[in-house]
Image: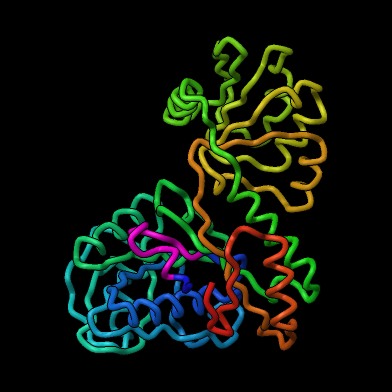
Amino acid sequence: MQLLDLIKNRYKIISVVGMSKNSGKTVTLKELMAEALEEGLNLGITSIGRDGEKQDIVTFTEKPLIYINQGSLIATVEELFDVCEARLEILEITNCNTSLGRVIIARALSPGYVQIAGPCTNNEIKEVAEKLLVYGADIAIVDGALDRLSSASPSITEATILATGAVLSRDMNKVIEKTAYQADIFNLESVDDEKLKDIGKKALEDKKICIIDNQYGINVLNIKTSLNSGREIASALTKDSRYVIISGSLVGKTLKDIVSHTRFFKDVIFVIKDSTRIFIDYRDWQYFQKKGVKLRVLEKINILAVTINPYSPLGYYFSPKEFLDKMKGILRPIPVVDVMMGGGV
């Protein structure tokens, strides 16, 4: 089975997000493109960050180039459109503006290398991905940017592939630990109480923080954001509290303050929109799990696979087989693929 087998006939818009730069995200994208060519499927590609340049503009390390086939669709910005080596037909100049110009949707009239940078906002990412489908892409892929996991949000893409690799640490076990943490975050269970879902959606629309009791009574807190508001949330919890609906982001300090200032935190479930709204260090995550903190999401991320890159641009590498075997053992049943070896799922 190949990576594409997890996607075709199931999903139309997916994302590929990396744990860090040089984690193998672009190689994963290239693997999907090669498999799509074999299957006769047409891909549409856009990116939150910038991809396809020969050298990383931040780390100055060499990057794998993006080579597209004739007929492929891309959404890229005006400034990069002119440096693409593939001959491109402009299909639409969108109203999505970036620091590098407007986003252009184009079809490749010839194979060649391209550089891709797309929209900046979540709504625009979804809009552009849908346009790629309208113009003939069988599958639209959103290439996630460094520390921007928002492209994995269920409100933008239907499923995601997580790319990780040796670049995260010289210690293989730490890489596996950090990757397992991110997979745990993505795999958070969704709320199955329909009444609570309705309350949660309304709270998110109104950008409110609410405490729900065991009779579905709603206490709307006079707090604009959960940031630095852990003590206020803690003081509002009672023995009858069952859920805390948090709009916006959830950070580690907020949870630490809640845990430190009330014993009722063990009796409630904290509910957020989706896992991309969580900003908690993986060691803090372990601490919260031991404490018994419970988190749920209104929209669950569908993680299709984890791809691994055993080589770091800093010159060190892991044993590919050992890295793959250990990662599979920890992440099972999530499929794990070594994209550098070009293997299947």
Is 231 placed left or right of 165 in the picture? right
Q: Quadrant of residue 40?
A: bottom left
Q: Is residue 2 above or below residue 261?
A: below
Is 115 placed left or right of 58 in the picture? left
Q: Position of residue 176 (x, y in %)?
A: 73, 65
Q: Position of residue 210 (x, y in %)?
A: 56, 22
In the image as oriented, which residue stretches furthest toward the front?
1
The question of residue 273 being in magenta is answered with no
Q: Which residues are magenta?
A: 4-16
The question of residue 13 being in magenta is answered with yes
Q: Is residue 204 above or below residue 32?
A: above
Q: What residue appears at the point 23 percent right and 74 percent down from the top-left corner? A: 106
Q: Quadrant of the C terminus?
A: bottom right
Q: Quadrant of residue 222?
A: top right
**What coloring was used for the rendering?**
rainbow
* Number of callouts: 0
Q: What residue appears at the point 64 percent right and 48 percent down from the top-left corner? A: 279
Q: Quadrant of residue 65?
A: bottom left
Q: What residue appears at the point 46 percent right and 79 percent down from the top-left corner? A: 31
Nearer to the camera, 193 or 274 = 193
Nearer to the camera, 82 or 263 = 263
Q: Position of residue 298 (x, y in %)?
A: 50, 35
Nearer to the camera, 43 or 237 = 43
Is 214 placed left or right of 7 in the picture? right
Is 308 placed left or right of 172 in the picture? left
Nearer to the camera, 78 or 133 = 133
Q: What residue appears at the point 23 percent right and 89 percent down from the top-left corner? A: 110
